[in-house]
Amino acid sequence: MKNILVVGATGQIGSELTMELRKRYGNDHVVAGYIPSAAPKGVLRDSGPSEVADVVDPNMIPEIVKKYKIDAIYNLAALLSVVAESKPMLAWNIGINGLLNILETARQFNCAVFTPSSIGSFGPTTPRVKTPQDTIQRPTTMYGVTKVTTELVSDYYFHRFGVDTRAVRFPGIISNVTLPGGGTTDYAVDIYYSAVKSEKFVCPLKEGTYMDMMYMPDALNAAVSLMEADPARLIHRNAFNIASMSFAPEEIFAEIKKNIPSFEMDYDVDPLKQSIADSWPDSLDDTCARQEWDWKPQYDLQSMTVDMIEKLKARKV
Ligand code: VAH
């Protein structure tokens, strides 16, 4: 990869992925694509090129690809699970019509494409524990429907047109930099902010609600490592299960309390978030990612918690 476009570069993953890619490939080689209502600010704006890149406009992406001689596109444009339930048609338009614009551009200009899937691509009939790489995917959310479709269409463009498409199924991602934007797993970020601000946390999911989660540094490393992997080793492409930790609210609370003994938590279950979380797996089997491109997370719940608290306190959030 020499010249990269990140679409959705100001979102929860995109904002940190853009900076990570600039660190690895050079600031001028990574273009931050954004929509006018979410323009880059601060170091994201000042450290490299940026362009308005609305995926639902079929002319915008090709223009940017030509202007910067782009050879790899990270497509992070999506509505997350909770927001997508309130705007299902917009979620489909961005997630799928936007994806087709990206893939058609990639086909025309020979770009590699990374469009992440999610544990949200599984549903209530999927085996819940150590969910296999190849299994039933009948999600019951529009977010999940767009993610299964993303996987199928991305694989189609690889097999039919030879477009180099690759992706992972992201779990809930926890960041100490960017706040989450309307997902079912947002509680796992919000809880840390409450803890360092000495506020009681009110958890929207009930005890025993297990979901796969991952610290942002591991998520960024997964995306870049997969795109740099030897294609000859890849048996799968869209999309790889990746995993690092699975926990329920009482477990992340207990881990934080080891570091902040005064921390308290209550429950006030959000029915929509609970129903979405209940439809997702408890844990994923990521053997294929480990075998095909040497995936290996660096953080677990304990080390993530120490780092999150340290970083949030340093930022005086
Ligand atoms: C969400 N954070 O909650 C996202 C993610 C697996 C969860 O897709 O919608």
Image (spheres, helix red, strand yellow):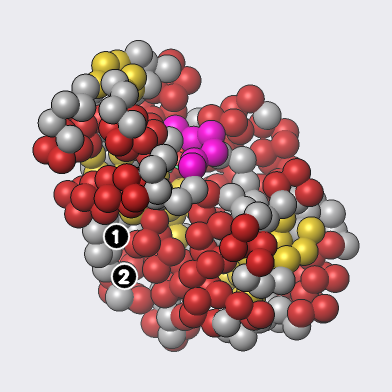
- The answer to whether 251 appears left or right of 168 in the picture is left
Q: Quadrant of the C terminus?
A: top left
Quadrant assignment, res 159: bottom right
Task: Specify few, some or many for label 1: CA neighbours under 10 Å numbering under 14, 14-19, or 20 or more.
Answer: many
Q: Main secondary structure of the magenta part?
A: loop
Position in image of residue 231 (x %, y %): 47, 83
Q: Are marks 1 and 2 in contact (CB under 8 Å)?
A: yes
Above or below 69: residue 181: above
Compared with 4, 34 (above or below) is: above
The total number of labels drawn is 2
Q: Amino acid at mark 1?
A: Asp
The spot of residue 134 in percent (x, y) is 38, 56
Quarter where residue 222 is shown:
bottom left
The N terminus lies in which quarter of the figure?
A: bottom right
Q: Position of residue 81 (x, y in %)?
A: 53, 35
Residue 237 magenta-highlighted: no
What label does residue 286 carry, if any? Answer: 1
| The CB of the residue at mark 2 lies under 8 Å from ligand 1 | no
User: Vertically, is 229 above or below 201?
Assistant: below
Front one among 267 and 126? 267
Q: Element under label 2?
A: loop
Crowdedness of circle 2 by 10 Å Cα count: few (<14), some, many (20+)?
some
Mark 1 lies within 8 Å of ligand 1 (Cβ measured): no
Report whether residue 7 is seen.
Answer: no
The magenta segment is: 179-184
Query: In the image, what residue occupies the spot 20% across and 27% down?
Result: 263
Instruction: Give the amino acid at mark 2.
Output: Trp
Which numbered dot is residue 295?
2
Note whether 280 is above or below 41 in the view shown: above
Point out the tag, 1 or 2, that comes first from the N-terminus: 1
The reply to whether the magenta stretch includes residue 183 is yes
